[in-house]
Amino acid sequence: MTVRRVMPVIQSEAVQESREFYGLLGFEEVMNLGWIMTLASPSTPAAQVSIMSSDKAAPVTPDMSVEVDDVDAAYALMRDSGAEIVHPLQDEEWGVRRFFVRDPNGRVVNVLRHL
């Protein structure tokens, strides 16, 4: 399994203010679904931060996202390790297959693969 990118997820209702703030650091909006917006560096596109009001399909808002090349394998490893699965493995309507898992620090990690 290969990690493709890691990005923090900031829960906030201050979407416009966040876009402007991170814009000062060189980030540009690359995705906006209304409830989640992702900003990326134009020179290093994998350097990203997401701003989320609340997750559209899950019971909690994740603290970070980890994109992997094999989300099914990641799910099996986490499940078999006894880690707490917070949101089940499923395909989402916006084009990702994902699950949420809680890390040892209590942080919720969104593990995903684009479909």
Image (cartoon, rainbow, N blue to C red):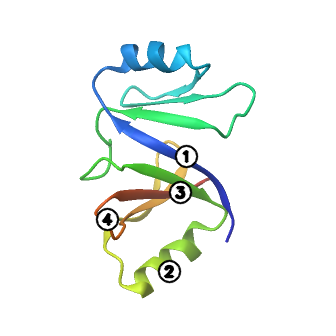
Between 104 and 57, the residue placed more toward the observer is 104
- Looking at the picture, which amino acid does disc 3 mark? Leu
In the rendered image, residue 5, in percent from the top left (x then y), is placed at: 63, 50
Q: Of residues 95 and 51, which is closer to you in this image?
A: 51
Q: Residues within 10 Å of mark 1 (few under 14, many from 20)?
A: few
- Give residue 40's position: percent from left, percent from top: 61, 29
Q: Is residue 40 above or below residue 1?
A: above
Q: Type of residue at label 4? A: Asn
Mark before the other along the chain sequence, 3 or 1: 1
Choose the circle earlier in sequence order: 3 or 2. Answer: 2
Say which residue appears at 50% left-offset and 42% top-offset.
94
Q: Is residue 34 depicted above or below 88 in this figure?
A: above
**Of marks 2 and 1, the one in the foreground:** 2
Of tags 3 and 4, the one toward the viewer is: 4
Instruction: Answer whether labels 3 and 1 touch (C-beta < 8 Å).
Output: no
Which residue in the structure is indicated by mark 3? 112
Q: CA distance from mark 1 to mark 4?
A: 29 Å
Disc number for residue 76: 2
Q: Secondary structure at mark 1?
A: loop
Residue on which the image places disc 4: 105
Residue drawn at x 37%, y 37% is 10
Tell me the residue at 30%/32% (across/down): 53
Q: Which residue is mark 1?
A: 95
Q: Is residue 2 above or below residue 47?
A: below
Choose the circle earlier in sequence order: 1 or 4. Answer: 1
Disc with the residue nearer the chain's start (3 vs 4): 4
